[in-house]
């Protein structure tokens, strides 16, 4: 997985407060812990601010209605 993609998935894990996914992505992709924590926190802050999630699981089936 590309570094950029791993950081995006870590942000989504933060949005969903999924610490297990965060840990797996952090370990498998050799990302700086400080950077990974910042992205996780950014995802959590986005959810708190009311931003909608863009992950496939959250948007599954919604494309047909737009």
Image: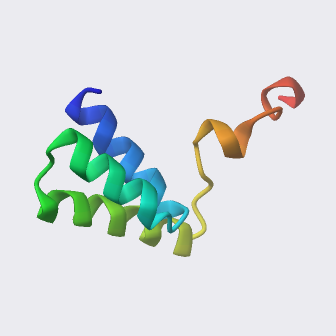
Residue at 23% in and 58% down: 36
Given residues 19 and 56, the one toward you in this image is 19
Q: Residue at x 83, y 32 (%)?
A: 61
Residue at 50% x, 68% y is 17
Q: Position of residue 14 (x, y in %)?
A: 44, 63
| Rendered location of residue 48, percent (x, y) | 54, 75
Taking the view exactly as shown, the residue that stands out farthest to the right is 65
Total tally of numbered discs in the picture: 0
**Quarter containing the C terminus:** top right
- The quadrant where residue 63 appears: top right
- The quarter of the displayed image where residue 62 is located: top right
Q: Quadrant of the N terminus?
A: top left
Query: Looking at the image, which is closer to me, 10 or 24?
Result: 24
Q: In the rendering, at what x and y percent does residue 58 appear?
A: 69, 46
Q: Is 43 left or right of 34, judged from the image as shown?
A: right
Height in image: 25 above or below 50?
above
Q: How is the image coloured?
A: rainbow
Q: Identify the image quadrant of residue 65.
A: top right
Q: Is residue 34 above or below residue 5?
A: below
Question: Residue 18: x and y, percent?
Answer: 49, 63
- In the depicted view, which residue is nearer to us: 18 or 12? 18
């Amino acid at each position: 997985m590309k570094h950029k993609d791993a950081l995006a998935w870590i942000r989504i894990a933060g949005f969903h407060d999924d610490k297990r996914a965060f840990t797996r992505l952090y370990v498998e992709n050799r990302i700086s812990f400080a950077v990974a924590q910042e992205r996780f926190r950014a995802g959590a802050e986005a959810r708190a601010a009311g931003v909608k999630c863009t992950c496939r699981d959250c948007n599954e089936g919604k494309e047909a209605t737009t």
